[in-house]
Image: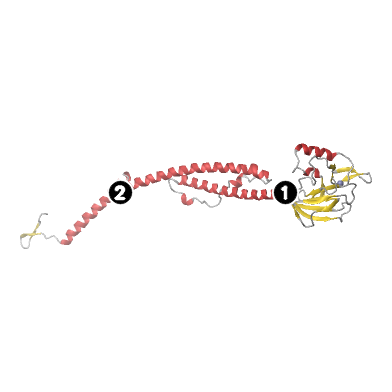
Amino acid sequence: MSKVKYYYDPESLSYRKIERKKRTTFKYAAMFILASAIFGFIFVFIASQYVESPKERALKRELQNMQLQYGILNKKMEHAEAVLANIEDRDNNIYRVYFEANPIPEEQRKAGFGGINRYKQLEGYDNSKLITESSKRLDILQKQIVVQSKSLDEIAKLAEEKEKLLAAIPAIQPVNNKNLTRMASGYGMRSDPFTKARKMHWGMDFTAPRGTPIYATGDGIVVRADARATGYGKHIRIDHGYGYMSLYAHLYKYNVKQNQKVKRGDLIGFVGSTGRSQAPHLHYEIFKDGKRINPINFYYGSLTAEEYAELLENASLENQSLD
Ligand SMILES: [Zn+2]
């Protein structure tokens, strides 16, 4: 109970009780509560600067865990970078070399991202550096993977082309010549069987009995199978693509028609002695970009090194051709 207060009233010359108004009481109470609240807030604010709340502790733990995870991610990225570097190295130094493509320059593979700062929204925090570095690393890694993937696409295409090219280029002997005794005359200066004059022999002659099978030496299309070329008699020309053409002359019979597609090893005709020929034999020529070249360089498909050396020696003998 609060004390009862009095005041002196000069008019009535007596002490009178001070009546406190209800509104005043309420005002005092409100001021008291407000003051307590302000002090309370100030106290809590100061305390919070030095004392962690359970929520803060939980957040801190979460943050530490995140940093730890970032550290682990960085280690994994390091590993991925090493694996990718190895693939890039093989790509540049083996695959691209094998398929005669230029290696992809390092700057192109490792190119960053110029222009605007893509990591601006990551700046201004305690962990900015860690997060920015990781993001950058991952971005570069991603780009490198795209570059590598494109390179492999290119190589796959080159491999396919190379396979086609290898199948197309003449690479076997046009007649069965296992013991290598059929090669009669090579490419180069030879004496003419009819005039005995020394002149250029533009192909290789394989002696064989009339009717011996003749095989296509590479994949291609039969562009001619006729006797309308002077000297060659019945002859076949196969266009192999890539600038290569093979020619088979003095045939006895055809086994293919014009515009027919053939594969290496297909039976295309039979040995004969039509045209300007001294005896049954196959006269074989190879053209590259319209020019006749030495067929001796095109038997790698079916000969060992020793056999090839023997054939090479026989082909270089300056003897008489069968034409
Ligand atoms: Zn010949």
Q: Is residue 154 left or right of residue 183?
A: left
Say few, some or many: other residues with alpha carbon within 10 Å of mark 1 (under 14 / 14 to 19 / 20 or more).
Answer: some
**The residue carrying mark 1 has its beta carbon less than 8 Å from ligand 1:** no
Front disc: 1 or 2: 1
**Residue 131 vertical placement versus 18 (above, below):** above
Identify the image quadrant of residue 206: top right
Left or right for 136, reference 152: left
Residue 289 in view of the camera: no
Q: Secondary structure at mark 2?
A: helix
Disc number for residue 45: 2
- In the rendered structure, the answer to whether residue 120 lies left or right of residue 20 reads right
Q: Is residue 101 left or right of residue 1?
A: right
**Residue 99 coordinates in the image, percent (x, y):** 68, 46
Can you give x and y, in whole percent of width and height, for residue 311 in the image?
A: 81, 39
Q: Amino acid at mark 2?
A: Phe
Seen from the viewer's position, the closer of residues 319 and 97 is: 319
C-alpha gap between disc 1 and disc 2:
84 Å
The residue sitting at the top extreme is 306
Identify which residue, 298 or 256, lies in the foreground.
256
Tell me which amino acid carries mark 1.
Ala
| Residue at screen point 58% across, 50% down | 146
Residue 275 rendering spot, x and y as whole percentages = 89, 51
Residue 83 versus residue 243 in the image, above or below: above
Q: Give the mark nearest the N terminus, 1 or 2.
A: 2
Query: Residue drawn 29% across and 46% down?
Result: 47
Q: Residue at x 51, y 44 (%)?
A: 77
Which residue lies under the disc numbered 1?
Answer: 167
Q: Position of residue 236 (x, y in %)?
A: 82, 53
Dot 2 crowding, Cα within 10 Å, few <14, some 14–19, many 20+:
few
Residue in the image at 25% along x and 53% along y:
37
